[in-house]
Image: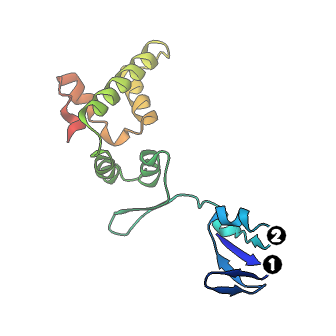
Amino acid sequence: MRARVIESFQTKKGLIPAGRIIEIPPVLLEKLQGTVEAIHSPVADVKPEPEAWLTESGELRTRGAFDNLAAEIVRLTADNLLLQRELLIRHCQSYDRRHFGRLWAEWEERAAIMEHDGGLSREDAEYQAASRLHLLAFMDVRAAARSGNREVFHT
């Protein structure tokens, strides 16, 4: 932590004069209360907003931590579902097969509820469920589901 010396003080390495800016641990700041004052940098105290962008070659670049990177990928690639699918697959490769099984079950459940309770056609319900789960790039799951192939999430 940065601090300004208010009153000169002696250390093992010599005298630290008043007015000098020094780096000290926060614990030491408490011990030297009245002798030094903390310098708060508004820039250092503010956590930067996460940022994501696509390079010209279609690579995803990020700065900061996202609560939901999949949603950010979908936002950035809304007009290019092939790129969206590729980036989402790369993002999800760290997940195990159980994650995709749960995601599949959640998609089926949402679609069924939207069809039954919402009065949507099966196709519209599947589309809406995929949209809410950020899965529009994977809409071929509909055809795979009807054929019994659940491996579409495991590409």
Query: Would residue 103 be seen by someone viewing this image from the given angle?
Result: yes
Dot 1 surroundings within 10 Å: few (below 14), some, or many (20 or more)?
A: some
Q: Quadrant of the C terminus?
A: top left
Task: Where is residue 31? Give x, y as percent.
Answer: 72, 64
The label shown at residue 34 is 2
Q: Quadrant of the N terminus?
A: bottom right
Whether residue 69 sits left or right of residue 25 in the image: it is left
> Does residue 81 sit above or below 130 in this rendering?
below
Question: Which residue is at the front of the view, 146 or 91?
Answer: 91
Q: Which residue is mark 1?
A: 6
The residue under the point 34% across, 63% down is 59
The residue under the point 66% across, 66% down is 28
Element carrying mark 2: loop
The residue under the point 72% across, 62% down is 30
Q: Which image quadrant is residue 44 in? A: bottom right
Residues at discs 2 and 1 in contact (Cβ within 8 Å): yes
